[in-house]
Image (cartoon, rainbow, N blue to C red):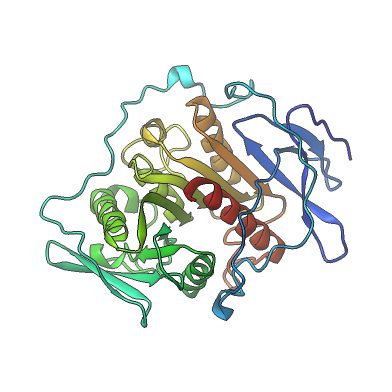
């Protein structure tokens, strides 16, 4: 293995045998290059974030979602200072991308952000134009205020994974709200058309999720202005939609279904470049290189676009890992090491941005 450490450091996923699977990590601050043993694929890496203090208790239901981090951390090297520079081979030319930054996702007129939460049922609800919107809800034990996370599900809707992930976050000290953004537009996991959803239902979903943010911030145990977003697949895309709101400090996107010009020709409104231009939050991206549902190249182009726009972004790739790698289900290729590593990095990222 060859490692160049002038601008970063190689990160390894620990394995049961004490070895490691290479992780490709891209950052706006710079990169370092090494080579994997399998196929000599170049890997770009930056130092991993320092995890925040973990709580001493974890709920059993969250065990399947990114279990406790494996002891041991790779060495770190300070990245070279200076503004981010897009790679010379970037397929995105920022000089050819003309964008008009949209305003922050607005609060829909006639809507109210009043929340009703049920800690026992771990659920919440709020209304818009007479339509009730339901959400999962989790809070830590003890007295707040706490930082908060808006959890955005994939096109499959709220799942057991989302509930388990929220429970894990609550055990780490975060209030979590996970709205159902399918039911209010009359769509189910079985009927959704991902090719047209971001156009046909964009305005309503954007406004509903903006209202969810206000609902979350209205809770008395949530600290003001300490909100992050975690999105899975399509939820990762909608995290970018909300990223222009000033209270959103951080977005973690798992295998995000990035959509629109100039990343790809996916139908979306507005253009994805507009969302990036307006983005104010820090971004952490995870993607498997063997993702058959959402091409890793879309993530690479999104990362390059963010860098070209001067945004604070970190991109971690897992070689040979597929879509939904953190979901222990028969539909996806669950990868325990990647899931645990992503959880560790997410907790460190949120801890740094929100605490």
Taking the spot 17% from the left edge, 50% from the top edge, the residue there is 108
Vertical relation: 247 (above or below) 5: below
The location of residue 278, given as percent across then percent down, is 36, 33
Is residue 106 among the parts visible in the rendering? yes
Vertical relation: 323 (above or below) 6: below
Vertical relation: 62 (above or below) 79: below
Taking the spot 70% from the left edge, 30% from the top edge, the residue there is 79
Taking the spot 22% from the left edge, 44% from the top edge, the residue there is 106
The location of residue 135, given as percent across then percent down, is 33, 69
**In the foreground, 341 or 268:** 341
Is residue 267 among the parts visible in the rendering? no
Residue at the farthest bottom position: 120
**In the foreground, 171 or 204:** 171
**In the foreground, 26 or 168:** 168
- Which quadrant is the N terminus positioned in? top right
The location of residue 308, given as percent across then percent down, is 52, 25
The image quadrant of residue 25 is top right
Vertical relation: 227 (above or below) 332: above
The location of residue 110, given as percent across then percent down, is 10, 54
Left or right side of 66 for 36: right
Taking the spot 26% from the left edge, 35% from the top edge, the residue there is 103
């Amino acid at each position: 293995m060859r490692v160049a450490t002038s601008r970063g450091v190689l990160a390894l996923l620990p394995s049961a045998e004490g070895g490691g699977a290479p992780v490709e990590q891209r950052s706006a601050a710079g990169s370092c290059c090494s080579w994997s043993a399998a196929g000599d694929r170049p890997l770009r890496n930056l130092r991993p974030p320092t995890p925040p203090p973990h709580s001493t208790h974890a709920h059993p239901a969250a065990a399947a979602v990114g279990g406790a981090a494996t002891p041991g951390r790779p060495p770190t090297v300070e990245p070279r200072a200076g503004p981010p520079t897009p790679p010379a081979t970037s397929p995105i030319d920022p000089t050819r991308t003309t964008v008009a930054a949209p305003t922050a996702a607005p609060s829909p007129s006639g809507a109210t952000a009043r929340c009703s939460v049920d800690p026992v049922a771990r659920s919440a609800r709020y209304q818009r134009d007479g339509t009730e919107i339901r959400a999962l809800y989790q809070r830590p034990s003890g007295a707040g205020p706490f930082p908060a996370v808006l959890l955005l599900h994939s096109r499959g809707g709220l799942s057991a994974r989302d509930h388990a992930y929220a429970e894990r976050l609550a055990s780490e000290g975060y209030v979590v709200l996970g709205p159902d953004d399918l039911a209010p537009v009359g769509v189910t996991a079985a009927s959704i058309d991902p090719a047209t959803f971001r156009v046909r239902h964009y305005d309503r979903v954007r406004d509903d999720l903006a209202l969810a943010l206000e609902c979350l911030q209205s809770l008395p145990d949530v600290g003001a202005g300490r909100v992050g977003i975690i999105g899975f697949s399509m939820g990762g895309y909608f995290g970018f939609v909300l990223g222009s709101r000033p209270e959103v400090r951080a977005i973690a996107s798992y295998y995000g279904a990035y959509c629109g010009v100039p990343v790809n020709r996916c139908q979306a409104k507005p253009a994805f470049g507009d969302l990036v231009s307006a983005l104010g939050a820090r971004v952490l991206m995870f993607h498997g290189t063997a993702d058959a549902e959402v091409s890793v190249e879309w993530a690479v182009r999104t990362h390059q676009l963010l860098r070209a726009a001067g945004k604070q972004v970190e991109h971690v790739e897992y070689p040979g890992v597929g879509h939904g790698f953190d979901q222990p289900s028969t539909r996806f290729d669950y990868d325990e090491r990647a899931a645990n590593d992503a959880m560790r990095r997410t907790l460190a990222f949120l801890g740094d941005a929100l605490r």
